[in-house]
Image (cartoon, grey):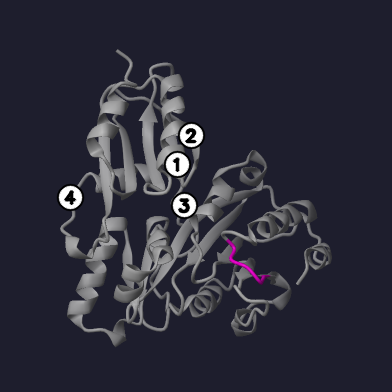
Amino acid sequence: MLISQFHIFLLSVLKKMKSKSISVTIITGFLGSGKTTLLNNIIATYNDKKIIVIENEFGETNIDKKLISNVDSSKIIELTNGCICCSVKNELGTVLNSLIISGTECDALIIETTGIADPGSIIKMFLGGDRVNRYFKLDSVICLIDAKNFLNSYKEYKEAQLQLIHSDLFIINKIDLVNDNELHKIESILKEFNKKELCKTNFAKVDGIEILERNVYSKSKLSNELILYSEPVAVEKNHSQAFETIHVSYKQNFKKRLFLFWIEQFIHLNSNNIPRIKGVVYFAESDKQYVLQCVNDSFQLYETDSYKESDALSEIVFIGRDINNQLINEALESLISK
């Protein structure tokens, strides 16, 4: 489907856009994990919501669109002949812009990536520009895990590992195909990346699993997550593939100008091995709380409505490979207001 055809499609369903921003859920997961089945189950479960689906297929023909049921086909947008995180990224931006211009009415936007996509670049699109943030709100990134093949794909493919780093909820699928020992190994690996929530299912069923309106990128959810990251989790390190999570906290406030300069330089130099950073920080120049979100080589720092309390801690989590904890601490300590 060509770009011009997207415009024709979108303009054919012109409606007034709601005043609230559209909630965006990204579904990722390696090849064969069952993402389209999950999408069908989500649509069936949330049948009271108006959902638009953006489907991405690596080849020229999108077979998955034919497999989606329980949703009006006019609400399914195809992105084909490329991976959504690279060659089709600009096309995704065009689609989002068309949705804004047309005023298409919906409650939620679900983006299903290819099995080899790095969702990081898609997240960046929603964390970045003011125009996108005005109309769309990134809700969460859900990663579907193929229990049968995960231990092999995780070790062999970088894309499978990046999907874990950027996801907020793991759903382990096909658990009937593995024994208890294999399932325990999978859970141990996943707990290194996500210390909040992990669900298990068969046939990608979502009964009892909160999928939409998770608000993972809200200030309160992030603050609770940082508390969990500060608590050690027992994992089997031989399965870690050198990925690690480092949590740092500081009672003192940072100098804002120096911090901004440092974080920009840091992610520029380290985005390949540390693709994910998030945290809550405080500055000497302000009495407000700030949220930090870094994905690959981009970052967002925004002021919240919360005020600094006497016992407030700046807390930052780094997720990646070969993280030099000592150098990070030394650098951050040099940014503290004396």
Q: Which residue is mark 1?
A: 293
**Residue 80 among those drawn in magenta:** yes
Q: Quadrant of the C terminus?
A: top left
Please tell me which of labels 4 and 2 falls first in the chain. Answer: 4
Q: What is the three-letter code of the residue carrying label 2?
A: Leu
Amino acid type indicated by mark 1: Gln
* Residue range of the region highlighted in magenta in the rendering: 79-84
Of callouts 3 and 4, the N-terminal one: 3
Q: Is residue 207 magenta?
A: no
Q: Residues within 10 Å of mark 3 (few under 14, many from 20)?
A: some
Q: Which residue is mark 4?
A: 232
Instruction: Assign a secondary structure to mark 3.
Output: loop
Which image quadrant is residue 106 in? bottom right
Look at 26% across and 60% down and name the residue there.
Answer: 191
Q: Are marks 1 and 2 in contact (CB under 8 Å)?
A: yes
Q: Is residue 216 left or right of residue 228?
A: right
Q: Residue at x 45, y 32 (%)?
A: 265
SS class of the residue under badge 2?
strand
- Of 30 and 289, the residue lying toward us: 30
Q: In the displayed image of the protein, which residue is found farthest to the bottom?
A: 177
Q: CA distance from mark 4 to mark 2?
A: 27 Å
Q: Which mark is residue 301?
A: 2
Are the two marked residues, 3 and 4, in contact with CB atoms closer than 8 angstroms? no
The kind of residue on which mark 3 rests is Asn
Label 1 vs 3, first from the N-terminus: 3
Q: Nearer the viewer, mark 3 or mark 4?
A: 4
Q: Position of residue 190 (x, y in %)?
A: 29, 63
Position of 315 relative to 29 (above/below):
above
Residue 215 is tagged as 3
